[in-house]
Amino acid sequence: MEIRRAIAMSFIPIQEILAGKHEDQQVGVRGWIYRKRESKKTIFLWVRDATGVIQAIVKEGASAWKEAQEITIESSVALHGTVRKDDRAPGGYEIPTQKMSILGLAETFPITKDVSVEFLRNVRHLWLRSKKMNLIMRIRSEVLGLIHCFFRKRGFIEISPPMFITSACEGGSTLFSTKYFEGDLFLTQSAQLYSEVLIYSLEKVYTCAPSFRAEKSRTIRHLCEYWHVEPEWAFADMDDVMSIEEDLLNYVCHEIVEQCSQELQQLGVKAEKLLEVKKPFPRITYKEAIERLQKKGFDLEWGEDLGFDEEKELAEDFKGPFFVFDYPREIKAFYCKTYRDKPEIAMSVDMLVPKVGELTTGGAREDDKEKLIKRIEESDLRVEDYNWYIDLRKYGTVPHVGFGLGVERLLMWMLDLDNIIDAIPFPRTIRRFFP
Ligand code: 4AD
Ligand code: MG
């Protein structure tokens, strides 16, 4: 009965109260007990809801005294009182509480001040209630919304790619295979090949969907399941790829400062870094990247791939995002288009940012049927697995481009996160897949 009544009554988001909109008014607040402090005749309860934390005060003799004594950290609660301004209270307002209902009395909450990071990762389902994760999840939602907005405004159609697939997009080494009735299939690494199908109908498409990578290396920037934004469009070239990537990053970084200024501030993220993102970004060729790294003492030859260490070092030369383009064909995927006069170079471009390294990979796709078949063979893939993909080059092939952006890498860079796992609610890594 109590619970039903508490849910039915009208309640005010705590943020509204802290904004001063309900001073001296009788309000109801619902949430969870964040902190509890007792003196002889007063109990101070910090109550959090989705929007903020406010102090509730219960005096001995008040009708809520018994509940206030009984209530524990993380219990859910509904309470009523008249809002009072008090500069000593966190947030500047408090609620002397007249009535309180315990909705769900919590057992002893395992997260206390001095638990280890490892422990917090093991109780992810409870740690997601923390202020930090609350803020990151809000910003994540906004960033995803902005990405959708960006592409839709530009006439890109969102398509829904399959998760079960039959053939690799990004090489076999990171494919997860999975039982599929009597046979086996894989989990998708990228929607790209399927998006290429749709450009013949819609011209400009994009996906925002999970990609799966069996990443055996434990790094701070790899997940086994991540959210991947992949636009693909026809009648475009490498310059168009870089230009739209600049516009996208510029849009997301500037808009997020508008939309989430409080959240960013509470997380300790400096808005300047995001506002400094401006078109055009510096562009260097892979060849120049190798030369820069050799000068810095790296033992690296033309033809070798850049790893996390190389990318981080390279990024030291630039304050913000920059492009590395024109990679050796051999270290890029089979679908990359090559230059007619430089067949050893792929029209492929990565965007890199400080501390995280690679944020995107994109480029032009091979649109010539014979060249594509040759590249599939050279990559030790079976041509028959790609028959449907090769068909696209048989019937009205067009020059086309696309790129892929890892949402968690973007968040990691924007929010200065130490590890990519905090950019997603339920991270999957080689060691971590629970809960
Ligand atoms: O560089 P990748 O492998 O490129 C592709 O998948 C292309 N098919 C994209 C395209 O052209 N449509 O992946 C693209 C991006 C990377 O730049 C990185 O941001 C992110 O996806 N990414 C990962 N993010 C987190 N964990 C991982 N294991 C990731 N692997 C790639
Ligand atoms: Mg890449």
Image: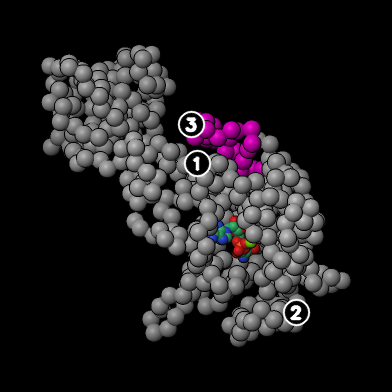
Q: Position of residue 61 (x, y in %)?
A: 12, 16
Cα–Cα span, label 2 and label 3:
53 Å
Ligand 1 closer than 8 Å to label 2 CB: no
Q: Quadrant of residue 361?
A: bottom right
| Residue contact between numbered discs 1 and 3, judged by CB atoms under 8 Å | no
Which quadrant holds the C terminus? bottom left
Q: SS class of the residue under badge 1?
A: helix
Circle nearer the viewer, 1 or 3: 3
The residue pinned by badge 2 equals 371
The residue pinned by badge 1 equals 139
| Membership of 260 in magenta stretch | yes
Residue drawn at x 21%, y 34% is 72
Q: Position of residue 427 (x, y in %)?
A: 43, 55
Q: Quadrant of residue 168?
A: bottom right
Q: Residues within 10 Å of mark 1 (few under 14, many from 20)?
A: many
The amino acid type, in three-letter code, at marker 1 is Ile
Q: Position of residue 387 (x, y in %)?
A: 62, 83
The amino acid type, in three-letter code, at marker 2 is Lys
Which mark, by number, is residue 266? 3
Count of marks overlaid on the render: 3
Q: Which residues are magenta?
A: 247-274
Q: Earlier in the sequence, mark 2 or mark 1?
A: 1
Q: Position of residue 49 (x, y in %)?
A: 34, 34
Which quadrant holds the N terminus? top left
Q: Earlier in the sequence, mark 2 or mark 3?
A: 3
